[in-house]
């Protein structure tokens, strides 16, 4: 049974930092990503990490470049999201997503497995 378990969300003041973690189990994944969804908004891509042929690839949404860093361990099926310089507009439920093949896709529809999400709230 595949499970993705996120942790690390919480309440932080603007300018602060949080580190999200996601532990995946049940099978091996070649790509893990973070998406987020704020109330009234569609789910949007945040960052992705993928592994293939000994290489590691990362992609970021423009609105987090320079502030967020994705990292992970392919062998351990784990992914992290370090979030610095948080803004109130970063407030959302953050979801971990996984796919058992190499993809550089930023589309939520291309990810097969999802966690339950972890709430991140940034106060002004």
Image (tube, helix red, strand yellow):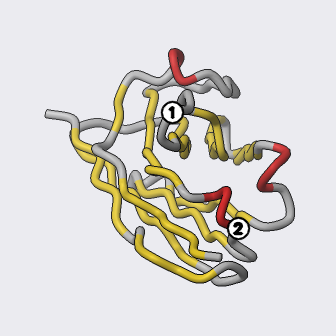
Q: Is residue 114 above or below residue 10?
A: above
For mark 1, does the 10 Å Cα neighbourhood hold few (<14), some (14 to 19), or many (20 or more) residues? few
Image coordinates of residue 112 in percent, x first then y, are 39, 22
- Residue depicted at x 40% and y 51%: 77
Q: Residues within 10 Å of mark 2 (few under 14, many from 20)?
A: some
Disc assigned to residue 57: none
Q: Residue 8's quadrant in the figure?
A: bottom left
> Which residue is drawn at the image coordinates 37% and 38% (left, top)?
28
Q: In the displayed structure, does residue 43 sit left or right of residue 5?
A: right
Q: Earlier in the sequence, mark 1 or mark 2?
A: 1
Q: Is residue 58 above or below residue 72?
A: above
Task: Look at the numbered disc 1 and give the secondary structure of its residue.
Answer: loop
Q: Nearer the viewer, residue 119 or 82?
A: 119
Tell me: 69 left or right of 101.
right
Position in image of residue 36 (x %, y %): 53, 44
Q: Which residue is mark 1?
A: 40
Q: Nearer the viewer, residue 93 or 83?
A: 93
CA gap between label 1 and label 2 equals: 18 Å
Residue denoted by label 2: 87
68 horizontally vs 81: left or right: right
In the image, residue 58 lies at what x, y percent?
Answer: 73, 46
- Quadrant including the C terminus: bottom right
SS state under label 2: loop
Horizontal side, residue 123 vs residue 53: left or right: left
In the image, residue 90 above or below residue 111: below
Image spot of residue 48 (x, y percent): 64, 43
């Amino acid at each position: 049974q595949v499970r993705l378990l996120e942790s690390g969300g919480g309440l932080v003041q603007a300018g602060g930092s949080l580190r999200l973690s996601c532990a995946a189990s049940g099978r091996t994944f070649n790509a893990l990503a973070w998406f987020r969804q704020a109330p009234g908004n569609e789910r949007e891509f945040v960052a992705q990490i993928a592994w293939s042929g000994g290489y590691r690839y990362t992609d970021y949404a423009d609105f987090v470049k320079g502030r967020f860093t994705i990292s992970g361990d392919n062998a351990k099926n784990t992914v992290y999201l370090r979030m610095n310089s948080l803004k109130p507009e970063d407030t959302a439920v953050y979801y971990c997503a996984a796919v058992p093949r190499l993809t550089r896709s930023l589309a939520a529809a291309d990810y097969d497995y999802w966690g339950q999400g972890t709430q991140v709230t940034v106060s002004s």
